[in-house]
């Protein structure tokens, strides 16, 4: 589904309405169906707030978010968190089933579907393990499976690999791309990592320092699979770093 963001603004107000902090400055963008788009910007610029507003976890102060021309219905937007947000008392399979359980899917059917995801996500043999018994990479696979099993129209990912070591991070980036190429979900991905943005994205949106506004929209017209250290990726990486440096120097 296409995503339209029209004049989206967000201001947090203090006690009694005083001391407001503007976080989003009337953002406008159109995201094509099935595309993989990354938002990147200075630390604290409002990237996570943007995802939370799109997901309906925070009300917008101005503007609107539309999926195929309509406000997102409940359950149509999935969000993958940075810290996995798994329930420690539920096994990997039971965590994956969670969204189906909330939706009222019968136990036998949600178990069947969850086990399909367990297999597809390379978690076979670990489905009855609890989160503390899984590696960080496995926990994030569980978190992604829990989101995708409900088949949302839009997938939001808030720095999902930030806490992982570089080798695991690279592996999960490749895993995520494989999923996306098969499913063609519309993905909005937030990261601080320029290499990650270049490796994953169809388009990269550069945001300003807070309050966030759109500085540049970059199309990544490089064939996949991409060479992380190739000259084309390096050139784009340098361009993004220069744009981000400009934002830091304006602060």
Image (cartoon, rainbow, N blue to C red):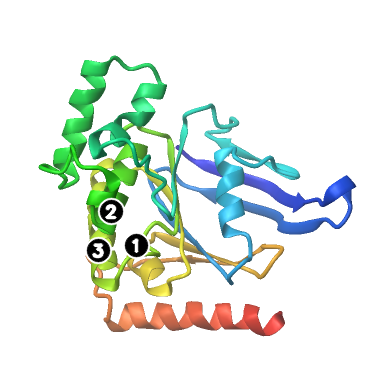
Quadrant of the rendered structure where residue 236 is? Answer: bottom left
User: Which residue carries the number 1 mark?
Assistant: 200
The answer to whether 134 is drawn above or below residue 238 in the figure is above
Question: Marks 3 and 1, how far apart in space?
Answer: 9 Å
Q: Quadrant of the N terminus?
A: top left
Would you say 209 lies left or right of 78 here? right
Q: Is residue 55 among what the camera can see? A: yes
Q: Which residue: 69% across, 66% down? A: 210
Residue at mark 3: 224
Q: Looking at the picture, does residue 153 appear above or below residue 106?
A: below
Q: Is residue 117 left or right of residue 83?
A: left
**Visible residue check, residue 223:** no
Query: In front: 197, or 112?
Result: 112
Q: Secondary structure at mark 3?
A: loop
Q: Quadrant of residue 148?
A: top left
Q: Where does residue 155 sit, x and y in percent of width and height?
A: 42, 43
Seen as rendered, the residue at the extreme left is: 125
Mark 3 residue crowding within 10 angstroms, few (<14) / some (14–19) / many (20+): few
Query: Contact (CB < 8 A) between labels 2 and 1?
Result: yes
Callout 1: SS: helix
Q: Which residue is mark 2?
A: 176
Q: Please give the name of the residue rendered at 40% of the width and 34% of the height, measured from the top-left corner.
A: 152
Q: Earlier in the sequence, mark 2 or mark 1?
A: 2
Number of marks in picture: 3
Nearest the viewer among 192 and 135 is 135
Q: Are marks 2 and 3 in contact (CB under 8 Å)?
A: no
């Amino acid at each position: 589904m296409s995503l339209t963001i029209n004049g989206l603004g967000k201001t947090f107000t203090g006690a009694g309405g005083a001391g407001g902090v503007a976080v989003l400055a009337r953002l406008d963008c159109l995201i094509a169906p099935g595309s993989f788009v990354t938002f990147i910007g200075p630390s604290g610029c409002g990237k996570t707030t943007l995802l939370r507003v799109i997901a309906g976890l925070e009300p917008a102060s101005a503007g609107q978010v539309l999926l195929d021309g309509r406000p997102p219905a409940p359950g149509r937007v999935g969000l993958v968190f940075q810290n996995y947000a798994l329930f420690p008392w539920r096994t990997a399979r039971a965590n994956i089933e969670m969204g189906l359980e909330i939706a009222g899917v019968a136990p036998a059917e949600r178990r069947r579907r969850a086990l399909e995801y367990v297999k597809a996500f390379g978690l076979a043999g670990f489905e009855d393990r609890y989160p503390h018994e899984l590696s960080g990479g496995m926990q994030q696979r569980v978190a992604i499976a829990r989101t995708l099993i409900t088949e949302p129209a839009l997938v939001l990912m808030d720095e999902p690999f930030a806490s992982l070591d570089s080798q695991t991070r690279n592996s999960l980036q490749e895993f995520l791309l494989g999923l996306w190429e098969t499913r063609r979900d519309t993905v909005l991905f937030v990261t601080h990592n320029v290499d990650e943005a270049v490796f994953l994205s169809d388009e990269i949106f550069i945001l300003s320092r807070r309050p966030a506004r759109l500085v540049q929209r970059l199309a990544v017209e490089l064939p996949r699979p991409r060479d992380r250290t190739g000259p084309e990726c390096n050139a784009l990486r340098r361009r993004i770093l220069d744009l981000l440096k400009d934002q830091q120097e304006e602060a």
